[in-house]
Amino acid sequence: MARWYGRRMARAIATDVPVDRGAMEEFIRPRHHAILATQRDDGTPQMSPVTMGVDRHGTILVASYPERAKVHNMRKRPRVDVCVLSNEFNGEWIQVSGAATVVDLPEAMEGLVTYFRSISGEHPDWTEYRRAMTTQGKVLIRIQPERWGPISRGGFPRRLTDS
């Protein structure tokens, strides 16, 4: 037990749980906050917080704009990493790596509808939504998971549980 201001506190122990594809998809499907990492021209990472959804095939979906750095980088180097976060800051997360495709309008429209549905359910006016996507010039980012895991949680190393 740790002490904090004189009180004894239980120590959270770090965990790493290896998962198969099905368990990875089950973990990420209800989570919509992620950090998307692409590679800049100089090789350094460019990271963006994103809202993400997952389609029925397990493809990660992100809506963006064609002018954004992440989109520019993906068009040149389609390998990306996504750290999918839990809603609470110190919750579990998983890193997913794979190939990204940027889909422009008009081909992106049905994928943008799937993106919205996977996060928020049904829109009250799909015609209005489609018009907004067109007016804003949105693009759809599709990430095919190729490598992932484990599902991790931060904390103290297990060796410190008895101290």
Image: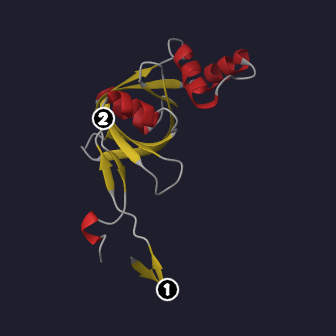
Relative depth, front residue between 8 and 39: 8
Where disc 2 sits, the SS reads: strand
x%, y% of residue 55? 48, 22
The crowding category of the residue bearing disc 2, from other C-alpha atoms within 10 Å (few below 14, some 14 to 19, many at least 20), is many
x%, y% of residue 155? 36, 63
Q: Is residue 15 above or below residue 138?
A: below
Q: Amino acid at mark 2?
A: Ser
Q: Is residue 74 visible?
A: yes
Residue found at x 49% / y 47% = 86
Q: Amino acid at mark 1?
A: Tyr
**Disc 1 target residue:** 5
Q: Is residue 57 above or below residue 51?
A: above
Q: Is residue 149 above or below residue 91?
A: above
x%, y% of residue 38? 34, 39
Dividing the picture into quadrants, the one containing residue 37 is top left
Where disc 1 sits, the SS reads: loop
Which mark, residue 97?
A: 2
